[in-house]
């Protein structure tokens, strides 16, 4: 679900001291975007919302979530909106976020 190699790379790229702030920013952005999906997004905006979420997810190592966003983005681009599982995307985000936050501290201490 989480690509911890990518998380380690991000941490190395930005430095341990700034990592927490970057994580907070990414999570805040993804929370806002997923709230927008929950509230309902105009069909013409769905592709760009899912694209944005995919980018943030990949940066933070949320691999399973990014994959679902990519599939939804592709379906939206083909006007196959009935093929987009928004509930599944949102569930995967919450599960990814929970795993990430529950594991993050222990992965980078020691």
Image (cartoon, rainbow, N blue to C red):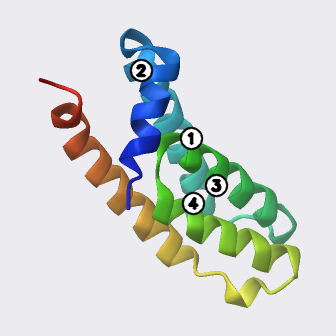
x then y, percent, for residue 10: 49, 30
Secondary structure beneath label 1: helix
Q: Which dot marks residue 26?
A: none
Q: Considering only vertical position in the picture, is 70 above or below 97? A: below
Q: Which residue in the protein does label 2 denote? A: 19
Cβ atoms at labels 3 and 4 below 8 Å apart? yes
Q: Compare marks 3 and 2 and give the one earlier in the sequence.
A: 2
Secondary structure beneath label 3: helix
Which of 82/101 is in front?
101
Q: Residues within 10 Å of mark 2 (few under 14, many from 20)?
A: some
Cβ atoms at labels 3 and 2 below 8 Å apart? no
Residue, far top: 17
Q: Is residue 59 visible?
A: yes
Q: Residues within 10 Å of mark 4 (few under 14, many from 20)?
A: many
Residue at 20% over, 32% down: 105
Q: Which dot marks residue 66?
A: 4
Distance between the alpha carbons at the discs numbered 3 and 2? 20 Å
Q: Compare marks 3 and 4 and give the one earlier in the sequence.
A: 3
Distance between the alpha carbons at the discs numbered 3 and 1? 9 Å
Q: Compare marks 2 and 1 and give the one earlier in the sequence.
A: 2
Asked if residue 10 lies left or right of residue 51, the reply is left
Residue at 55% over, 49% down: 57
Q: Compare marks 3 and 1 and give the one earlier in the sequence.
A: 3
- In what quadrant of the picture does the C terminus appear? top left
- In what quadrant of the picture does the N terminus appear? bottom left
Q: Which residue in the protein does label 1 denote? A: 59
Q: Which residue in the protein does label 3 denote? A: 54
């Amino acid at each position: 679900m989480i690509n911890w190699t990518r998380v380690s790379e991000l941490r190395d790229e930005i430095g341990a001291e700034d990592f927490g702030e970057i994580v907070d920013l990414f999570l805040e952005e993804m929370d806002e975007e997923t709230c927008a999906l929950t509230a309902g997004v105009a069909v013409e905006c769905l592709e760009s919302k899912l694209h944005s979420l995919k980018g943030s997810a990949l940066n933070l190592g949320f691999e399973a979530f990014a994959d679902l966003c990519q599939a939804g983005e592709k379906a939206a681009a083909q006007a196959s909106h009935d093929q987009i599982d928004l509930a599944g995307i949102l569930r995967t985000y919450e599960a990814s976020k929970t795993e990430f936050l529950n594991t993050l501290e222990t992965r980078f201490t020691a």
